[in-house]
Amino acid sequence: MIIEVGNEKGGVGKSTMAIAIAAYLAQLGHSVVLVDTDSQKTSSRWGELRTHHGLPHNFVIVDKSVDPTEHIRKLAETYDAVVVDIGARDYARLSDLAKIVDLWIAPTRVGQGDLESTVELAYAFEKADRNHKNGKIPLVICPNAVPAAWNSTEGEDAIAALREALPNVPVTSNLVRDRKVWRDAHKLGRSIFEMPLRDREKAEAEFKAMFEEVWKAYENFQKGVKHGH
Ligand SMILES: Nc1ncnc2c1ncn2[C@@H]1O[C@H](COP(=O)(O)OP(=O)(O)OP(=O)(O)O)[C@@H](O)[C@H]1O
Ligand SMILES: [Mg+2]
C-alpha cells in the first residue's frame, strides 16, 4: 500500500510522522520503503545519520525528488508499505501523488494559519477526487505538536474547528503532543521507538493511539470502495 504524508504548510511534522510510520510498520514485521520526495531531504539525511551512528536499517530509504509517482507505484509492487514524505508548498507534486495514494495523512499544527492551510488542502483534494483511482482521495487529518500543558485546550479546539469546516473528513481525536523526544530522536538518527522508555513513553502512546485511529479511517475508506461510493 501507498501511504503519503503531506500538507502544504511547512514544519507541521510531515517528515517526523513519515519516519515514525515507516519505523512502526517495520517494527510490526512489514517490508517498508520510505520515499523522500522533498528536495530538503529531511528523511534521507536522517537515514544517513543512522548509518553514521551504526544503527540498523529496519527499512529502506529512497531519495526521489524528481518524478516520483511512477517510481512509487513500482515500489508498491515489491514492498508491503511505501511511505512517502512530501515536501511543503509543492502543489503540483501534491495533486499528482494524490492520484495513486491508498492513505493520505495530513499532519497539522493547531495554529490558526496551520488550520486554514489544512482546510485549503482538503478543499483542493475534494476537487481532485475524480482523478483518484477510487474516486476519493483517502485523507485523514492528524493534529501534531499540540501543546502538552495539562490546561491547554488548543488541540481539542482545533479538532472541533476542523470537523466543523470539514464534516466529511476524518480528523483524529488522538492528538500527538509537542514532546522533546521527537526532536531529540531526529537529531540522533533514531525513531522514537529507539529512545529510552522514560523519554518516549508518552509520545509513543500518543502516536500509536493516533495511528490506530488512522487505520480505522483507512478501513472505512476501503469499505466505501467495496460498496461503490
Ligand atoms: N510532536 C512533536 N513534538 C515535538 N517536536 C516536533 C513534533 N513534530 C515535529 N516536531 C519538530 O518540528 C520540526 C518540524 O518537523 P518536520 O521536519 O517533521 O516537519 P515537516 O512538515 O516535514 O517540515 P518541512 O515542511 O520543512 O518538510 C522538527 O524540528 C521536528 O523535530
Ligand atoms: Mg519535511
Image (cartoon, helix red, strand yellow):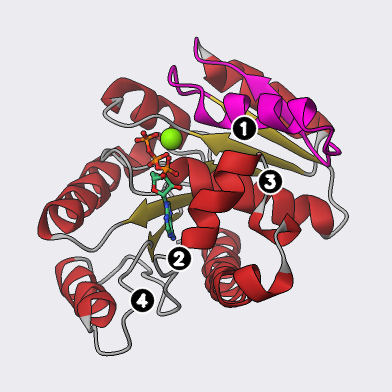
Disc 2/disc 1 C-alpha distance (Å):
19 Å
Tell me: 183 left or right of 58.
left
Residues drawn in magenta: 37-66
Disc 4: which residue = 148
The verdict on residue 48 being magenta is yes
Tell me: 169 left or right of 180.
left
CB atoms at circles 3 and 4 under 8 Å apart?
A: no
Which percent across, then down, holds residue 24? 72, 57
Mark 4 beta carbon near ligand 1 (under 8 Å): no
Q: Earlier in the sequence, mark 2 or mark 4?
A: 4
Disc 2/disc 4 C-alpha distance (Å):
7 Å
Report the residue at 47% width, 61% height from top: 180
Disc 1: which residue = 46
- The label on residue 139 is none
Tell me: 47 left or right of 99.
right
Q: Residues within 10 Å of mark 4 (few under 14, many from 20)?
A: some
Mark 2 beta carbon near ligand 1 (under 8 Å): yes
Quadrant where the N terminus is found in the figure? top right
Q: Earlier in the sequence, mark 2 or mark 1?
A: 1
The amino acid on which the numbered mark 4 sits, given as a three-letter code, is: Ala
